[in-house]
Image: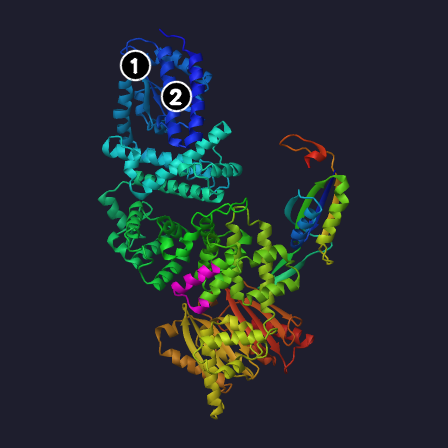
């Protein structure tokens, strides 16, 4: 099993969700996050007051999938989240040792 | 002497009895019958056990009895509720005699499957109010004889408790209030939960019990006699609360049977099942789950109302002296008095007058104090009298003005809820009836639509006292809104379409709001603003979620939609309140930050794009706008001159001003043209009007150097503080300047004849009739209220040569003070700059000005712009 963590533009979230659904992946955890990578943010002035936008709002999508679905999921995210501009986000992939469904204690891929 | 109880036969009887209860409820759905039947089963069991376990000594030796308490005492024993029993003894000797049998009774009850709690007390102990255990004394109010010495139970019921209630009335009612407050607090002080607890949540059965107890205490202390609580309620409220009790009790019986334990949480899934089984409905009629939940919330609301009223009545002690004292209270006036933190009407008969009726709620909104029970009863009598059957009997526009007055008061939420409770809000605004208790059934919308709406209005009022910095930013925007009443009215109507047929709730809300605005007497400009806000109330949320708000194109598209800063401010606040009141977690700091950034980006875009889009007679969209203005002006025949007048103004001009105002500006321009054609070389037209406590002067003149500086100087000379201004010019060189100013010294207010003189000065300056030396000399108003301010606002000046194709945009923020704008415009004129457009605003102590500048018809060079910035910084430092 593999965990895929994608930090994406909030405006692309609906496309990403639809693309994953189309690829047969429906379970996910979504979080409102803020941060920056190479896109460092900027400073805005409103009515004479400076406010720095150094941590940009993003959406984090986390999903754990069977290993055979990893490439499909990554492909779906890449295609649907990309605008070609700085700030499109990143994908992180990690191996998962075990998954347990709390309700009935099913384990492994059956619990996904 | 005691005998072993026949446990086997009792066990079989109990099991059979429970099965019968379940079958009977499934067949008939009669919750009250189920409660009574389980109570009877418990009574039989208890009597049988008592007969076996307790000593058969003569009563004079061991006087004791078993008394049912709590729900069991009320004969309302739910399928999985505990059995509360009092073992009441006449004296210590009796208590000793029944001690061991009492313990055996508890064991036997548990063996038989009853979750029983048996409390032992002497009769004299029941005559004390236990401060540390008020629940016990309150539970005695439900006491009912089951077995043993009936005379002992009668002594408790007929002698001890009436005397105790009379003596301890205040403490008992306070305990009830305190226990209720704590319980409600545990449930977030709202009856609106996605999965409500049918017993303990506000509007649950415990609140109904509290109403019964409060009524019992009141009646016992008044009459020293027991009466049925319902007889003390009477009227519609008693009926609706009775129906509410039956409905919610049925749902709780259903839950107990379903869960097999005393679990009172009506879960999301079980709501579906209960609705499909028609639980609580006449004839167990199945219903759609959203409609069934709508019934639940209506019933819960009726119970909360009954509970509040019962506590109020039980706690209030009328005396002529107190009433007289309160009459003198600070908040009271000749129409309304405040007594025990409730509003009383001094002339109930006058409530028949619709205007007076609404003035009661204006008073409530001003002070945030609930109407008293008696006052509400009087209002209900008026509303039920038939005069309101065919609609609002008073002048609708006057009702509109009152409603707008209520909406802007700090206690608007209290007043609107009180109006909604008695049906007055529906009478003034029938459109709101469609969303009464309307459920949006998903896990996101926690509240019914009416509750969401009222919470949204309260969220904006709450902003005024917000301490948290992110909220303060929105509070500052709210303080700048010119007509907050229209914002609140838009919130009140923004979701009414959800209760109407069709999929497009926004469209339905707009249609309904259009009817309401026409009826309530809004002007065309006000109506357009309200409808714009309602039509676009989801736009900012959508833009946040579906667009990249750091993409200039996305900001441009959104800014073009709102077009003017005032609309942007109102839409932003409406969005803030709308999201915040969906559920307590909906407006995350993340979302609030996104909303703020979108607002700031759009506000900056609007300030920096004034001259980007100008009206041209050739564009179809402009022709359409011009037609709208022409259609609403008295100058319909003058299509060509009107188009020529507007040609070259920023497009925003058409949205900044109502059609009537544009028509008026055109009249001024038309008169000026006639004078110029007639040969006057130095002519100008000006007009002054009072507007919401401030003054507004509009000047139309031919453009010439130092015109703006001259006009601001004239106003300064009169001691006027300019709060807002805009300056535009059209393609033929006609300048239209509008100044909103505060009359710091009340010159115009106290001397109306001075208004003509001020206008004359403005016209003289605009027409160039004053030479440079004869122009009014600006007053160095260092002694005005603002001049004394110690607030530190650093002067900041930004120059942008990129955002406009034809002008250099200069943004300036400085501490506001009389004469500031004149000083700035003089410095600009001294630098040889021409003001193509200006947007002047103040926010508290801060002046925020944007100028579109050219020199010799072109943008400033980068070096010139930098030098101008330095000049201004230096010039504004001078006293």
Q: Is residue A82 left or right of residue B165?
A: right
Distance from disc 1 to disc 2, alpha carbons, whole Å, reads 22 Å
Q: In the picture shown, does residue B387 fall above or below B340?
A: below
Q: Nearer the viewer, residue B866 or B406?
A: B406
Does any portion of residue B775 appear in the rendered image?
no
Q: Nearer the viewer, residue B154 or A78?
A: A78
Q: Nearer the viewer, residue B521 or B792?
A: B521
Per the image, label 2 sits on a secondary structure element best described as helix
Residue B463 drawn at (x, y percent): 48, 54
Q: Nearer the viewer, residue B231 or B360?
A: B231
Range drawn in magenta: B509-526
Residue plotted at (38% across, 61% down): B400
**Is-magenta flag for residue B517?**
yes
Q: Residues within 10 Å of mark 2 (few under 14, many from 20)?
A: many
- Residue B63's disc number: 1
Residue at numbered disc 2: B42
Q: In the picture shown, does residue B239 fall above or below B108?
A: below
Circle 1 chain: B
Q: In the picture shown, does residue B738 fall above or below B539?
A: below
């Amino acid at each position: 099993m593999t965990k895929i963590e994608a930090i994406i533009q909030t405006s692309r979230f609906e496309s990403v969700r639809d693309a994953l659904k189309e690829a047969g992946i429906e379970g996910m955890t979504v979080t409102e996050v803020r941060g920056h990578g190479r896109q460092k943010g900027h400073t805005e002035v409103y009515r004479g007051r400076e406010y720095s936008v150094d941590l940009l709002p993003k959406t984090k999508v986390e999903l754990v999938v069977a290993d055979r679905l990893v490439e499909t999921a990554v492909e779906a995210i890449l295609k649907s989240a990309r605008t070609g501009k700085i700030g499109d986000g990143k994908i992180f992939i990690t191996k998962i040792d075990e998954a347990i469904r709390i309700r009935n204690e099913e384990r492994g891929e059956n619990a996904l | 002497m005691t005998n072993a109880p026949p446990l086997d036969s009792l066990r079989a009887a109990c099991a059979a009895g429970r099965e019968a209860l379940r079958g009977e409820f499934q067949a008939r759905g009669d919750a009250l019958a189920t409660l009574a039947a389980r109570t009877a089963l418990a009574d039989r069991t208890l009597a049988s056990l008592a007969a076996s376990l307790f000593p058969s000594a003569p009563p004079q030796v061991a006087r004791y009895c078993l008394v049912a308490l709590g729900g069991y005492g009320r004969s309302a024993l739910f399928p999985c509720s505990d059995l509360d029993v009092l073992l009441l003894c006449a004296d210590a000797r009796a208590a000793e005699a029944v001690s061991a049998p009492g313990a055996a009774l508890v064991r036997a009850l548990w063996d038989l499957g009853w979750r029983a709690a048996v409390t032992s007390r002497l009769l004299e102990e029941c005559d004390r109010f236990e401060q540390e255990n008020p629940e016990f004394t309150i539970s005695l109010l439900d006491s009912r004889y089951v077995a043993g010495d009936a005379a002992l139970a009668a002594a408790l019921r007929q002698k001890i408790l009436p005397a105790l209630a009379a003596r301890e009335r205040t403490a008992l009612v306070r305990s009830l209030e305190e226990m209720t407050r704590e319980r409600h607090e545990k449930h977030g002080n709202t009856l609106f939960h996605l999965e409500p607890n049918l017993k303990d949540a506000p509007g649950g059965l415990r609140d109904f019990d509290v109403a019964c107890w409060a009524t019992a205490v009141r009646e016992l202390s008044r009459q020293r006699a027991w009466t049925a609580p319902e007889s003390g309620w009477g009227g519609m409220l008693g009926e609706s609360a009775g129906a509410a009790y039956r409905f919610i009790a049925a749902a709780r019986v259903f839950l107990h049977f379903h869960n097999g334990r005393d679990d009172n949480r009506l879960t999301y899934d079980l709501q579906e099942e209960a609705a499909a089984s028609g639980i609580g409905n006449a004839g167990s009629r199945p219903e759609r789950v959203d409609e069934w939940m709508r019934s639940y919330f209506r019933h819960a609301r009726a119970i909360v109302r009954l509970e509040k009223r019962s506590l109020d009545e039980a706690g209030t002690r009328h005396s002529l002296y107190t009433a007289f004292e309160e009459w003198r209270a600070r908040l009271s006036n000749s129409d309304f008095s405040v007594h025990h933190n409730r509003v009383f009407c001094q002339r109930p008969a006058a409530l028949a007058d619709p205007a007076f009726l609404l003035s009661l709620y204006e008073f409530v909104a001003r002070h945030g104090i609930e109407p008293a029970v008696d006052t509400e009863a009087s209002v209900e009598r008026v509303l039920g009298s038939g005069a309101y059957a065919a609609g609002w009997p008073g002048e609708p526009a006057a009702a509109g003005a009152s409603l707008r007055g209520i909406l802007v008061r700090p206690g608007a939420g209290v007043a609107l809820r009180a109006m909604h409770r008695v049906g007055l809000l529906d009478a003034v605004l029938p459109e709101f009836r469609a969303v009464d208790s309307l459920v949006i059934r998903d896990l996101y919308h926690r509240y019914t639509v009416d509750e969401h709406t009222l919470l949204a209005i309260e969220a904006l009022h709450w902003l005024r006292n917000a301490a948290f910095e992110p909220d303060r930013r929105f509070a500052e925007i709210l303080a700048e809104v010119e007509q907050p009443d229209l914002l609140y009215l838009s919130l009140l109507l923004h979701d009414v379409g959800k209760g109407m047929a069709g999929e497009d709730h926004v469209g339905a809300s707009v249609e309904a709001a259009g009817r309401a605005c026409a009826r309530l007497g809004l002007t065309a400009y006000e109506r357009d603003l309200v409808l714009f806000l309602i039509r676009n109330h989801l736009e900012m949320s959508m833009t946040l979620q579906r667009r990249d708000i750091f993409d200039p194109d996305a900001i441009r598209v959104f800014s073009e939609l709102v077009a003017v800063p005032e609309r942007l401010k109102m839409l932003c606040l409406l969005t803030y309140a709308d999201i915040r009141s969906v559920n307590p977690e909906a407006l995350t700091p993340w979302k609030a930050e996104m909303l703020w950034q979108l607002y700031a980006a759009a506000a900056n875009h609007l300030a920096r794009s004034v001259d980007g889009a100008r009206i041209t007679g050739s564009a179809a969209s402009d022709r359409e706008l011009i037609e709208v203005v022409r259609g609403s002006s008295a100058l319909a025949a003058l299509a060509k001159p009107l188009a020529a007048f507007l040609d070259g103004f920023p497009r925003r001009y058409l949205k900044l001003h109502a059609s009537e105002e544009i028509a008026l500006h055109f009249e001024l321009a038309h008169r000026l043209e006639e004078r110029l054609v007639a040969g006057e070389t130095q002519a100008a037209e000006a007009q002054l009007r009072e507007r919401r406590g401030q003054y507004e002067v509009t000047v139309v003149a031919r453009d010439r150097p130092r015109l703006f500086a001259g006009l601001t100087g004239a106003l300064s000379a009169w001691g006027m503080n300019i709060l807002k201004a805009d300056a535009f010019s059209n393609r033929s060189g006609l300048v239209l300047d509008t100044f909103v100013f505060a009359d710091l010294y009340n010159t115009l207010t106290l001397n109306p004849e001075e208004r003509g003189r001020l206008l004359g000065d403005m016209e003289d300056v605009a027409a160039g009739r004053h030479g440079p030396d004869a122009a009014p000399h600006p007053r160095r108003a260092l002694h005005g209220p603002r001049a004394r301010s110690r607030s530190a606002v650093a002067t900041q000046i930004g120059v942008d040569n990129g955002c406009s194709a034809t002008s250099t945009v200069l943004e300036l923020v400085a501490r506001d003070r009389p004469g500031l704008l004149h000083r700035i415009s003089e410095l600009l004129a001294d630098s040889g700059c021409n003001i193509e457009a200006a947007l002047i605003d103040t926010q508290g102590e801060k002046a925020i000005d944007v100028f579109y500048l050219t020199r010799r018809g072109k943008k400033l060079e980068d070096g010139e712009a930098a030098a101008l910035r330095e000049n201004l910084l230096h010039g504004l430092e001078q006293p």
